[in-house]
Amino acid sequence: MILTGLLDDGVAGLAEIKRRGGIAMVEDPDTARYPSMPLNALKCVQVDHVAPIPQIAALVTELTHSERRGIEREEPMEKTPSQLTCPECRGPLSREQQGKIVEYSCRVGHRYTPLAMENEHHDTVERSLWSSVVALEEAADISESLASELGEKSLREAGNKREQAAILKKMLSDVPSE
């Protein structure tokens, strides 16, 4: 069952349940607070039931009282190397496709749907850039504190690093948030 949610990271699990003969149920996207996950499930999985939240409990109760024999379907897994890297560990990613479901996985075991990977990669880039700002500011602080021992060159270096940090901060603050 897929309920309201963002992105598409629950869709692969629903597809696996369906492949193994289970019943696939999705909250009606028109009534979902966040319709992204239900919409992605409907795009990628042959769903058995779509219902708004108030009707789901009755539907689940009805299904538990009915007899059903699921039929497992075999869908081959295609795994190919990609040029992408893992947002968490920076290791190489493989693209895996089974039916309409696409996921990326690294050798460490991190797994991403395309939308989840894009979102996580965005967060990784932002964390890296802010780490750079902090490193530049710390380098400027070090240069300033050593200026009395190292002289004028150290003060110029501190000024350059502060300027770089300010430019990077401005760039980051100008980026629209998603």
Image: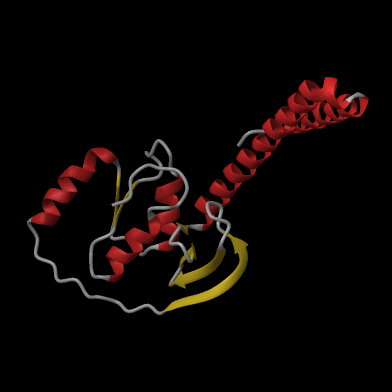
Q: Position of residue 93 (x, y in %)?
A: 55, 65
Residue 106 in the figure: left or right of residue 135: left
Residue 4 visible in the snapshot:
yes
User: What residue lies at 79% left-to-right and 24% top-to-bottom?
Assistant: 146
Location of residue 57 with respect to 103 vertically, above or below: above
Residue 70 in the figure: left or right of residue 29: left
Write down the quadrant of residue 15 in the picture.
bottom left
Q: Position of residue 147 (x, y in %)?
A: 84, 23
Q: Position of residue 111 (x, y in %)?
A: 45, 59
Location of residue 126 with respect to 101 vertically, above or below: above
Q: Quadrant of the C terminus?
A: top right
Q: Nearer the viewer, residue 3 or 121?
A: 121
Residue furthest right in the image? 152
Residue 175 visible in the snapshot:
no
User: What residue lies at 28% left-to-right and 59% top-to-bottom?
Assistant: 24
Residue 109 in the figure: left or right of residue 86: left
User: What residue lies at 86% left-to-right and 30% top-to-bottom?
Assistant: 157
